[in-house]
Amino acid sequence: MASIHVDIAATEWTSGVPFYGPDAVYDGKDIVQLKVLVDRRREGGGISWIARFLPPPGKLIKIVAVALSDEHIFNLEGGRGTKSGQPARNAGGYGLNTKGQPHSAMIATETVSLIVYTGEPDEIKSMEVVDISPAG
């Protein structure tokens, strides 16, 4: 198979709804946007994308999922947060959710991540926009 090259800057952001479900839209705006880089699932491979999470001001995006294949996450900008909106993992971090692993994320600031699945992407169990809790 030939090498695949993607011009990320020229690739348009698309709605995350096909992968994250209808809750990827909040108040009529996409709060999850994707740039799908490669989808080789039909050939027995995986799928990769750049995801942009855009929580509304004063709120955070809470995602609960199960990994249907190994999921590699590279935080490029922003990162995961706590219920009070404080950073928990910043840009430059890496995470791996192995196949079958239940996991969650709380995202309180605009976050951009490169996500690589070795097969099928996560099964999203729930996704909601919640108020940031006061630090306690």
Image (cartoon, rainbow, N blue to C red):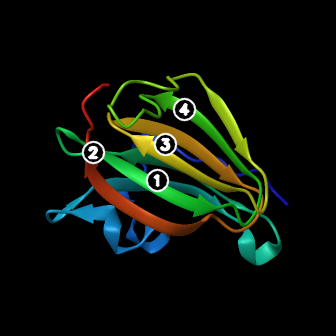
Q: Is residue 74 shown left or right of residue 110?
A: right
Q: Kindly indicate the quadrant of the structure image that contains residue 48.
A: bottom right
| CA distance for labels 2 and 1 | 18 Å
Image quadrant holding the N terminus, namely bottom right
Q: Does residue 58 appear in the picture of this structure? A: yes
| CA distance for labels 3 and 1 | 8 Å
| CA distance for labels 3 and 4 | 16 Å
Badges 4 and 2: C-beta atoms under 8 Å apart?
A: no
Instruction: Look at the numbered disc 4 and give the secondary structure of its residue.
Output: strand
Residue type at mark 4 is Asn
What residue is shown at x 53% (from left), y 67% (from top)?
Answer: 124
Which of these two is toward me, 132 or 10?
Answer: 132
Residue designated by label 3? 8
Q: Residues within 10 Å of mark 2 (few under 14, many from 20)?
A: many
What residue is shown at x 80% (from left), y 56% (from top)?
Answer: 2
First in sequence: mark 4 vs mark 2: 2
Q: Does residue 13 appear in the picture of this structure? A: no
Q: Residue 22 has which mark?
A: none
First in sequence: mark 3 vs mark 1: 3
